[in-house]
Image: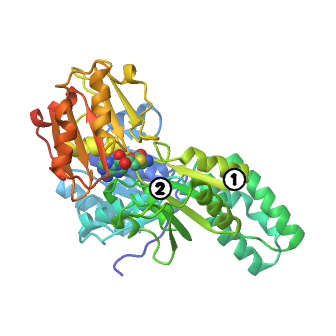
Amino acid sequence: MKHLPIFLDIKDRPVLVVGGGELAARKVESVLKAEARITVVAEDLCQTLQDMAEKGSLEHQARAFDDGDIAGVDLVFVATEDEDLNRRVSSLSQDAGVPVNVVDRIDLCTFIMPALIDRSPMLVAVSSGGDAPIIARVLKARLETFIPAGLGRLAEFAGACRDRVKDAIPEGPLRLRFWEHFIHGPIAEYILAGQEEAAGNLLDETLASAGESGDITSRGEVYLVGSGPGDPDLLTFRALRLMQQADVVLHDRLVTDDIMELVRKDAERIFVGKRRGDHAMPQEEISQLMVRLAKEGKRVLRLKSGDPFVFGRGGEEIDVLSSEGIHFQVVPGVTAANGCAAYAGIPLTHRDHAQSCVFVTGHAKDDQLDLDWPMLVRPSQTLVVYMGLDSLPMLTEKLIAHGADPKTPAAIVDNGTRPGQRVVTAPLEDLARRAREEDLPGPSIIIVGSVVTLRDRLSWFKPFPG
Ligand code: SAH
C-alpha cells in the first residue's frame, strides 16, 4: 500500500492554499465540504474563487507566498504554475511537518486526494495512488451508479435511531438481525424513496412488536419494476438495485433473457406470462401470489416490460397490494413507445409535425376495437398503438374511415431496442399488407403520423438500425 487512507476531521482548522486558479478552486471546493477554515494566498483569483471569497467561504490574501504562511496550518495545497514556488512550498511544508499536496506533482506530495463518492455521512474514497487517475475515475463512475443517491439519508436515519433500537432490543444477536432486516427491507426502501415519515412509522411498529415478542418477523414487500422494452442498458439504477436484492421474481413473456440475467442469481423465478398455445396466469392469481409471497416475508420483484403504469396493469396490482397492507414501491421504466421511437429514429413530437402524442391499446375485445376514433385522427398528432399487430387491418381501416389520410406515414417497430429490431414503414393504407409480408414476430408497436418521415431525413446513431 503506497498511501494510508485516513479521513481527516478538519472542521474549523486552518488550511492554506497557494495559488488562485481553477485547479486551486477544485481543491478548495473539496476542502470546504469538510468545513475547514481556508486561506488562499495568490496575487489574483479566478472567478470561482472570487465568488467564494465574496461569500465569505474563504479568506483571500492578495500577495505573494511568504515562508511564514505555513506556520500553524494543518494542511497545505499548492496549485501554481511556478515550478520553483511549488517545490519551495512543498519542502517548507515537509520541514515543518505539515502534510502537503501539490496538484499534478505526486513527487512533491506527502498526501494525495482520492476520487470521492459522497453520500455523506457515507463516503467512498477511490485512489490509484497517483498511477492511473483515469482508472480511479472509471471506478468512481461505476460506484456512483451502484450506490443509491439516498444512502446518506439512510445512514443518518440509522444513526438517529441507534439508541432507540438498543433500548427496544437489548439482546445483541437479535439486534444484529434487526439491522439486517432494516437495511434490506421496506424501512430502508422507504428512506431511499424519500418517504421518511412512512419509514418512521414502520420503524415504530417494528420496534413495538420486537419489544413484545422479542422477535423480529421479517417483512415482505413488493417491487413493481418496469424493465423497459428489452435493451438492458435502458434499466434504471433503482430497477437494477432491486433486481439484485429480490428473493423471488415474477416475470412475464416480454421481459427478455438479457434482463433476467441481471436478477440475483439465487432468486426464485416464477414465470407468470403466456407462452405460445398456453394460458397466462390470470391477473387475480398473480396479485394473490404476490400477496402470499410478501406475507411469507419475501422481497418480491414483479418485473414488467416497459413501464408498469403504461398498459401494464400496474394499477390493478397495487390496488390489491395496498388493500392487503403490503409495502410496495413502483419503479418506472422506459415504455415501448419511447424506447422504440428513439431506437428507430422517430421523434414522437416535433415542432413542425406533431404537438401531441397519444398512446392507445389496439387489443381487440370480441374482435372489436372500441376506440375514440375522431380523437385518434386529429391533425398534428402522433398516434402510438400498443398490442396492435393482430388488429392492424381493422385499425388502419377504421382510422381511414374516420378521416385519416390513407397516405399518412406509418411505421411498425418490431422487437424494438433488441438486437432483432426491425422497422417497417409504409403509408397507412399499405401498412397491414406490409406487416403480413414481413411476417413480424412481435412484440411490435405502431407509430402513425408525419414524424415517421423524419426517420429518413435525420441521420443519427441508431443502436439497431432495422
Ligand atoms: N408496459 C409496457 C407495455 C406492455 S403491453 C410498456 O410500457 O412498454 C405489450 C405491448 O407493448 C406489446 O404488444 C407491444 O405493442 C409493446 N412492446 C413491448 N415491448 C416492445 C418492444 N421491445 N418492441 C416493440 N413493442 C413492444
Q: Quadrant of residue 351?
A: top left
**Please, what is the three-letter code of the amino acid marked with disc 1?**
Ala
| Residue 156, image x, y percentages | 63, 56
Few, some or many residues within 10 Å of mark 2 (<14, 14–19, 20+):
some
Q: Quadrant of the N terminus?
A: bottom left
Q: Nearer the viewer, mark 1 or mark 2?
A: 2
Q: CA distance from mark 1 to mark 2?
A: 18 Å
- Please give the name of the residue rendered at 42% of the width and 36% of the height, measured from the top-left corner: 368
Check residue 199 in the rendering and tell me which mark sits there, or answer none.
1
Nearer to the camera, 238 or 301: 301
* Residue shown at the point (57%, 50%) measured from the top left: 193
Tell me the residue that label 2 is attached to.
238
Q: Is residue 136 visible?
A: yes
Q: Amino acid at mark 2?
A: Arg
Count of numbered circles on the image: 2
Q: Is there any visible trace of residue 120 in the rendered image?
A: no
| 74 to 212, vertically: above or below | above
Mark 2 Cβ inside 8 Å of ligand 1:
no
- In the picture, measured across the screen, residue 217 lies left or right of residue 102, that is right
Residue at the extreme front of the image, as rendered: 366
Disc 1 crowd rating (10 Å Cα; few below 14, some 14-19, many 20+) is: many
Label 1 CB-ligand 1 distance < 8 A: no
Toward which corner of the image does residue 113 lie, by quadrant?
bottom left
> Where in the figure is residue 451, as x and y percent of width and height?
21, 29
Q: Is residue 274 above or below residue 356?
A: below
Element under disc 2: helix
Q: Which percent across, then down, holds residue 185?
A: 64, 64
Which quarter of the picture shows residue 140?
bottom left
Q: Which mark is residue 120?
A: none
